[in-house]
Image (cartoon, rainbow, N blue to C red):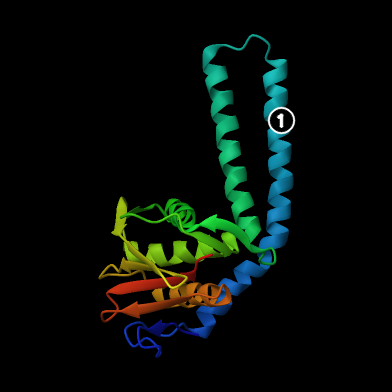
Amino acid sequence: MTHLDEHGNVCPHHASAVADELLALATVGSRAPSFHHDLASKLQGLMMAIDEISEISGDTPPPLTRALDTAHTTLKEVLALLNANRALTKPPVSARTTLAEVVARAGERVYVTVRGSIPASSLLVSIPAVTHALALVLDVAGGPGRGRSVDASTIVADGVATLTIPAAPDPPSNVAESLALASFVFKRERGSLSCAAAGAKLIVRLPVT
């Protein structure tokens, strides 16, 4: 499994995804539905316990109030992460969104700031899948370290949004698997992922509506 270059050929700049690595990822993914169910049940119990602590505490001193507020906020954030991950395990359903929205969500997921003007072009796609695929691309493009950022540019023409992202010169070790999986998702959504400029640029194309 691989991805293509700008000429539609197998990309010569990145190695092909190794079947064993993809199967290892698939093994983890096969556990996801039951893991999500078990985790949601435990989080529900934790939420009830925090609510009960709040009720029986009465006039809580400020330190305890702050601790409870922190617990509630953290729990909401964990639930949001869980729900986003659970959405990936469901059959893809197309819904309307914008390119700007999915790029922003993808960047937040992998802590990569996307600079450049991303248009609010309308998309009809599986939002969880496309967001995840874009996150994989941005994770590769952002390179290692913290405080990562990329300068993206977008052209919308003939019903297609073309997003060009410069790739880091030192991509992560799982670059082949990440790009192969992202390419699979974009192809399923009637788009594509390709490498250009000797692998220095990643180009995502998605149909706009």
Instruction: Give the quarter of the image for residue 158.
Output: bottom left
> Where 136 falls versus 18 (above or below)?
above
- Residue at image position (34%, 88%) is 12
Residue 132 location, x and y as percent? 52, 62
In the rendered image, the vertical position of residue 128 relative to residue 11, given as above or below: above
Query: Quick check: can you spot residue 173?
Result: no
Q: Nearer the viewer, residue 109 or 185?
A: 185
Q: x, y (%) of residue 122?
A: 51, 59
Closer-to-camera residue (7/17):
7
Indicate the position of residue 138 as horizontal and vertical percent values.
39, 63
Q: Residues within 10 Å of mark 1 (few under 14, many from 20)?
A: few
The residue closer to the viewer here, 178 or 24, is 178
Q: Report whether residue 19 is seen.
A: yes
Q: Which residue corresponds to mark 1?
A: 49
Front one among 102 and 159: 159
Q: Residue furthest front?
A: 158
Q: Is residue 7 left or right of residue 38?
A: left
- Tell how many labels: 1
SS state under label 1? helix
Identify whether 125 is placed above or below 56.
below
Instruction: Give the residue drawn at x 35%, y 83%.
Output: 6
> Could you tell me which residue is drawn at 58 percent across and 31 percent down?
71
> Which residue sits furthest top?
59
In screen coordinates, is 202 left or right of 72?
A: left
Residue located at (46% from left, 56% from top): 106
* In this rendering, position of residue 57 left or right of residue 22: right
The percent position of residue 209, horizontal first and vertical second, equals: 54, 64
User: What type is the residue that disc 1 sits on?
Assistant: Ala
